Image (tube, helix red, strand yellow):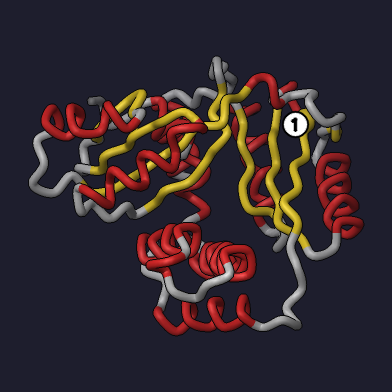
Amino acid sequence: MSGHSKWSKIKRKKGANDQKKGKVFSRIAKEITIAVKEGGSIDPAFNSRLRLAIANGKGVNMPKDNIQRAIKKGSDTNTANFDFLTYEGMASGGVPLFVECLSDNTNRTLANVRSIFNKYGGSLGATGSVAFMFDRKGIFEFPIGEWDIDDLTMEVIDAGAEEVEVDDEGTVTISTGYSDFGNMVSKLEELKIESSSASLQMIPQQPVSVSASTAKSVLKMIDFFDEDDDVQAVYHNMDLSEEIMEMLNNE
């Protein structure tokens, strides 16, 4: 139950970038728009993907007006379609990166991703070149509230929970296999637990320790990826030590 679990280390970059609220809202708005277009309904009760996207928006205090605009955009037949794209490559120091994008212009996105890899000392690889180092997992986060962690674990284990952890701030993180993601969504709804974040993420099979200089270089490169509007998420396999995390957070 450590506050610096493997999940918190993996999510260190995500936490830093979530401070850029405008960028986070933009990403979730895109998810909401796609959920409406693909789900065929603007009613969250009949569109599970939309319901999940809205929950993620509420989890980062996304304004209701932003959510409604994204829903309206998704119901507009003139709104461009988005493609889900993934790119794989190596950052400086041989650190693998897996980049997820949502784009309405694949040529633009590919050019931008390749440019960032080249400009900041990395190299864009072929499909499958690093994906085998990761597993796609469902990751759910929410405040523990009045729950006892042992009771909660017993409730969610039958829905596919592989690990259940709570950090020092009372945030519960549940991981599931890819195929159990929907089961866990349904289970948490049954328990009347509203996730502050629920998503499928690429989790490294064997996180690797790196030096402070390598971590700083790679995280700086990820910052540039995060500035691109098409990029939704960037995953790495660095196991950031508490000392490195503290040093980076104090810069």
Quadrant hosting residue 126: top right
* Structural crowding at the residue carrying mark 1, measured as other residues with C-alpha within 10 Å and reported as few (<14), some (14–19) or many (≥20): many
Establish if 31 lies above or below 77.
above
Q: Is residue 23 visible?
A: no
Residue at image point 72% right, 51% down: 84
Where residue 184 appears, as percent x and y from the top left, is 35, 40
Residue at image point 36% right, 66% down: 58
- Quadrant of the rendering where the N terminus is positioned: top left
In depth, the one of 230 and 219 nearer the eye is: 230
Residue at image point 20% right, 42% down: 170
In depth, the one of 171 and 105 nearer the eye is: 105
Q: Is residue 210 left or right of residue 109?
A: left
Q: Amino acid at mark 1?
A: Ala
Where residue 93 appears, as percent x and y from the top left, is 73, 23
Establish if 195 lies above or below 28.
above
Q: Is residue 248 left or right of residue 87?
A: left
Establish if 41 lies above or below 216.
below
For mark 1, what is the residue? 91
